[in-house]
Amino acid sequence: MHATGTADGPADRLHHPALTPHGFPTVRPRRLRSSAAVRRLVAETRIDPADLILPLFVREGAAEPVPIPSLPGIVQHTEDSLRRRAREAVEAGVGGIMLFGVPDPGRKDPQGSAADDPDGVLNRAISGVRAEIGDAAVVIADLCLDEFTDHGHCGVLDDAGGVDNDATLRRYAQMAVAQAAAGVHMVGPSGMMDGQVWAVRQALDAEGHQDVSILAYTAKYASAFFGPFRDAVNCSLVGDRRTYQQDPANSREALRELELDLAEGADIVMVKPALSNLDVVHQVAAASHVPVSAYQVSGEYAMVEAAAAHGWLDRRGTVLETLTAIRRAGAGTIATYWAVEAARWLRD
Ligand code: PBG
């Protein structure tokens, strides 16, 4: 049955099941890698443009789009350029658009009042983008206070200067209702307050917004990879978010957060950052009965762009490989600053 190994072959050592007369294996995984056609046929992971979500920044009062140095190629949009970019994303087949507001510094205060002002930068952006693209892609808004508070925390502070969980929930509830009134399809509570999905769901339902869904930032880590984002939204934070965002040392608590978010009514659950937490994406995907999303964050983008600009990495290859890895780990959808470009590559 088994040919005897020769001096040339590995037969004895490997106890290979089927060997050539020279003692080499006949079972060869390389056959399924031997042509582009067969690789395409057997690929387990595919990305569709519809799986991608494009994050977009809009800056209050901007006359021209403002480049963000730590995110090359990404800008703080004007209301007009935002609408144009949203349309381009739809034309490229991108599935969702996630909006972040950058208010005028003079409008920031301890409560983040501009966040639920119908005339605030984010709420205006929501209505502008809805007017532009209608239902052609899902319009999602970040639901968090950090862009709007003068101290830069994701919630309101208590007398001791800590982030007050329950007072923050009341603000998130107000913000959710304002975003729904502006026409958002989906809200993305990203502040990692306990009970945030519950608070947002209650508030939306009480105001008749049963159809607005919740993309919950379920496992969000206190991450150095958010650095460029803080520049992108001109965040005023001094210090860190370690009392509310998860410790990168832990994955068990991601499953606890998942259980709570599902019980509170999350429609989609998200893990972020993506690439440094692929194990968490995998665990969440295995345990979740709602769709799973992952956010390829600003630092992940900046890292690849910087290396590619030096000629140290092949840009397109790296981007598509990271997106594939995130998808393979179990994310159904991916928020990425490369959404439009990647969507075009995927259609080529
Ligand atoms: C909070 C929020 C952050 C990001 C998305 N929503 C920043 C933070 O928690 O400090 C980060 C996104 C990125 O880095 O691309 N509103």
Image: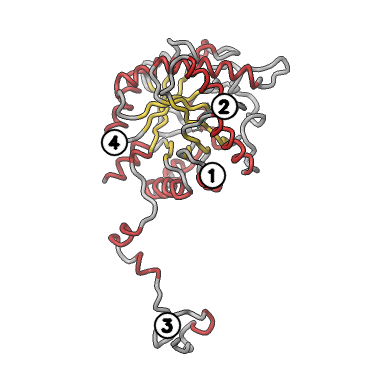
Residue that numbered label 3 is attached to: 19
Given this view, does label 4 or label 1 mark the residue nearer the observer?
A: 1
* SS for callout 4: helix
* SS for callout 1: helix
Residue that numbered label 4 is attached to: 92
Q: Amino acid at mark 1?
A: Ala
Q: Quadrant of the N terminus?
A: bottom left
Given this view, does label 1 or label 2 mark the residue nearer the observer?
A: 1
Q: Is mark 2 within 8 Å of ligand 1?
A: yes
Residue drawn at 51 percent across, 11 percent down: 107
Q: Amino acid at mark 3?
A: Leu
Q: Residues under labels 1 and 2: Cα distance?
A: 22 Å
Q: Residues within 10 Å of mark 2 (few under 14, many from 20)?
A: many
Residue drawn at 52 percent across, 38 percent down: 271
Q: Residues within 10 Å of mark 4 (few under 14, many from 20)?
A: many
* SS for callout 2: loop
Q: Does 152 sit left or right of 92 as displayed?
A: right
Given this view, does label 2 or label 4 mark the residue nearer the observer?
A: 2
Q: Amino acid at mark 4?
A: Ala
Q: Residues within 10 Å of mark 1 (few under 14, many from 20)?
A: few
Q: Residues under labels 4 and 3: Cα distance?
A: 50 Å
Q: Residue 191 shows which numbered tag?
A: 2
Q: Position of residue 263 (x, y in %)?
A: 56, 32
Q: Amino acid at mark 2?
A: Gly
Q: Position of residue 121 (x, y in %)?
A: 43, 15
Q: Earlier in the sequence, mark 2 or mark 4?
A: 4
Residue that numbered label 1 is attached to: 287
Given this view, does label 4 or label 3 mark the residue nearer the observer?
A: 3
Q: Marks 2 and 1: in contact by CB < 8 Å?
A: no
